Amino acid sequence: MTTDHDDDFEPHHTSSPTDQVLHELQLYGYRPFNDEPDPRPLPEANILVGSISDIFDALVVALADTRLEPDLEDLLWSTVNVFHRAIERIERELDDNELAQQRSQREQDGSEVKSVELERLTAEGQTLIERRNAFELMRDQAADQFGTAAAPAVLAYLFHRIETAWTAAQRCSSSTKAGWRSMTRISPASSASG
């Protein structure tokens, strides 16, 4: 059986706009625009706590007993500070949102347009509050982890410094004692000859 299909004359099919949108959603997921509410949920608190703990554990494991260990405390505190700066940024956005809500309330004239705008600003403000609360939880957990992770590292570093100083002091003391002994051996001989 023969077919009369000739592939040379078949036009090239491009994907439809719907197919392109679906393909993008499959690859990258839904991302709302800046002026749209984000329907995705916030991360669960126990996942955040575990993740923060993992961050600190990774830094401590990677830097402990290496030449970078003296920098560990600063790096761990910087991790806490990252969340604090995020909170400050969100609070600035929240302040701007509050001013926009107040302005929108003053401009209310009963029209649906103004009402929808105020509802959008209120929803955006609620989202900012939730984000700030999530970052506060992360900052607080990071501060707790800093206390538990940095203390042993700092103590180990200080112990090493003290031990080094003690060893040096003992060497110095031993050489001083040896010097005193040699001087005392020399002293009687020099006094007898004198």
Image: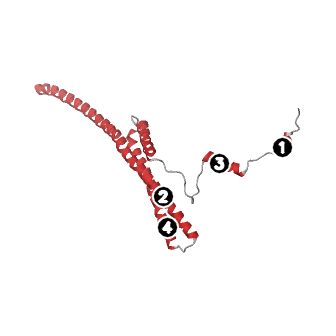
CA separation in Å, label 3 and label 2: 27 Å
Q: Is mark 1 on a helix, strand or loop?
A: loop
Which amino acid lies under the numbered mark 4 shown in the image of this protein?
Gln
Residue pointed to by mark 1: 10
CA separation in Å, label 4 and label 1: 59 Å
Residue pointed to by mark 4: 101
Which amino acid lies under the numbered mark 2 shown in the image of this protein?
Leu
| Colouring style | secondary structure
Q: Residues within 10 Å of mark 2 (few under 14, many from 20)?
A: some
Q: Which mark is residue 24?
A: 3
Q: Residues within 10 Å of mark 1 (few under 14, many from 20)?
A: few
Which amino acid lies under the numbered mark 3 shown in the image of this protein?
Glu
Sequence-wise first label, 2 or 4: 4
Cβ atoms under marks 3 and 2 closer than 8 Å = no
CA separation in Å, label 2 and label 4: 13 Å
Residue lying at 44% horizontally and 57% vertically, measured from the top left:
88
Q: What element carries label 2?
A: helix
Sequence-wise first label, 3 or 2: 3
Sequence-wise first label, 4 or 1: 1
Cβ atoms under marks 2 and 4 closer than 8 Å = no
